[in-house]
Amino acid sequence: MEEERFIRLLYSPAADSVIAQFQRKGATGASVNRLYIRRTSEVAYRLIGSPESNISFDFPTVPSDAPSLFFYETLWEDGGGSPRRILRLDLSNEGLDTIFDPSTFSWPSGVSRGWVSALVGASARGDVLTGVFGLDRSEERRGFAYWLCELDYGSHQLKEISRLSAAFF
């Protein structure tokens, strides 16, 4: 097994499960994150999904009242990382699905493109995610900026909460 270093531990009270995040060097030399799960009654952790060596699972978060785990997938290639999509793992049956793909998302008026920079949290029911999004408004001559946003993925609505200073990152 490749050498991994511990990053964070999450607990889902709704699923009585523990999620552990570890980091290792991927095929491109970039650090990639892996997620593992176990029920509190189990001893061994299981790898979530079967990510390729250049895929990282980043910024995991769990809602308090729903048996879900949310995280985003980053593709590392050619020296850089590209956030690809937000995934949800149903902790009751371990089914994995895409809930947000920036390439197919209908961005708010004036936004020509956008991406997820970080997931910050989830609502108690798990129907709204809070995150940092890069939004490009170059067509309005306002340019690109990072925003703290709420994503209601069921209704495909993105609500801007606050513009974040570039110095924030």
Image (cartoon, grey):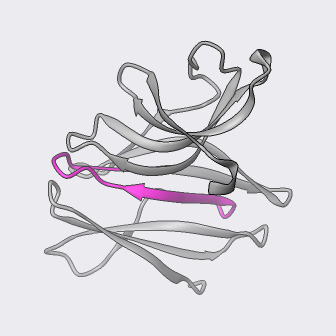
Q: Can the viewer see residue 50?
A: no
Relative placement, left or right, of 51 versus 11 is right
Instruction: Please tell me how many numbered marks the rendered image carries.
Output: 0
- Image position, residue 96 (x, y; %): 39, 45
- Image position, residue 143 (x, y; %): 77, 29
Q: Quadrant of the C terminus?
A: bottom right
Q: Is residue 75 above or below residue 125?
A: below
- Image position, residue 144 (x, y; %): 73, 34
Going 63% across and 37% down the picture, which residue do you hit?
115
Span shown in magenta: 50-69
- Image position, residue 30 (x, y; %): 73, 69
Residue 153 falls within the magenta-colored stretch: no
Relative placement, left or right, of 119 versus 85 is left
Q: Is residue 10 above or below residue 84?
A: below
Q: Residue furthest right?
A: 78
Residue 54 falls within the magenta-colored stretch: yes
- Place residue 154 in its image quadrant: top left
Q: Quadrant of the N terminus?
A: bottom right
Relative placement, left or right, of 26 versus 107 is right
Q: Can the viewer see residue 119?
A: yes
Going 66% across and 64% down the picture, which residue do you hit?
53
Going 56% across and 22% down the picture, which residue do you hit?
105
Going 66% across and 15% down the picture, which residue do you hit?
110
